[in-house]
Amino acid sequence: MPDKHISSQFDADLEHLSSSFFAMGGLVESQLTAAMEALSRFDLDLVEKVIGEEHRLNAMEVEIDAACSNVIARRQPIASDLRRLMALSKGITNLERAGDEARKIAKRTRKIANDTAGKNMSVAEIWSLGQMAGTIFHDALAAFARLDAVEAARIMREDEAIDEQYRAFVRKLPAYMAENPRIISSAIDYVSIASAIERIGDHAKNLAELVIYVVKGKDVRHISLDELEREAMDH
């Protein structure tokens, strides 16, 4: 009976931590959506709203990390339970950093909004990148919630597509800037925005790696995608 009581207390602790983790993930998702919307309309009120969420996200990271450490110290979990707590602790770092990138998008948007030439630039790739990153970030949180290793492996391959689109955007800019010197300053800001979006994709990939770590008990950060997919599908 005592063991069952301890187990139920641990389950309650884990449920509370998971709930806090996904609340933080939801906030980061809304920040990315708002940052891209602010860019689409050069909405400076929305820019300030995104930037203003920084303290809230930082506070959530500190609070959840302290709670994870507290549960580990009190419950001394082993095996998969310990991996889940470690994944939550590492995961919130990725959430906080993804939030940082959303704020970078907002700050660069504020600069572009003051440049008429920059506001008229054709940057279709940025919208595509933002949509792709938003989708895999959402999917990574869903895979984390379900502990779905197969979905996590798919997300990691999707991140490769984001990286390629980012590189294609950067490659086209020098010629564009040579033809339109007035947009050079804003073009640099757009590169920073594209880079921030690409890094949000990286953080989604990191969350997916943590899912596989919890489910399979293996660190897959430095293996090929083909090996990773085989590992994820191996029962």
Image: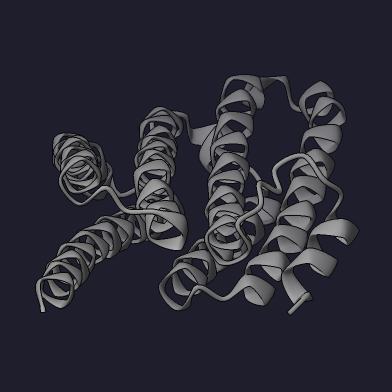
> Along the line of sight, which residue is nearer the eye, 78 or 201?
78
Indicate whether 199 appears above or below 217.
Answer: above
Q: Residue at 41% x, 36% y: name it.
A: 97
Indicate whether 197 appears above or below 8.
Answer: above
> Along the line of sight, which residue is nearer the eye, 204 or 220?
220
Q: Residue at 64% x, 29% y: name it.
A: 187
- Number of labelled discs? 0
Q: Residue at 82% x, 48% y: name it.
A: 164
Q: Quadrant of residue 53?
A: top left
* Image quarter (top left, top right, bottom left or bottom right) of the C terminus: bottom right
* Image quarter (top left, top right, bottom left or bottom right) of the N terminus: bottom left
Indicate whether 44 appears above or below 205.
Answer: above
Residue at the extreme front: 1
> Along the line of sight, which residue is nearer the eye, 224 or 68?
68
Residue 233: % across, % down: 77, 76
Q: Quadrant of residue 26?
A: bottom left
Q: How was the colour assigned to the protein in this rendering?
A: one colour
Indicate whether 9 appears above or below 182.
Answer: below
Residue 23 lies left or right of residue 135; in this view the side is left
> Along the line of sight, which residue is nearer the eye, 49 or 65?
65
Residue 121: % across, % down: 63, 43
Residue 193: % across, % down: 54, 37
Residue 222: % across, % down: 77, 39
Q: Residue at 17% x, 71% y: name it.
A: 3
Residue 23 lies left or right of residue 150; in this view the side is left
Residue 64 lies left or right of residue 179; in this view the side is left
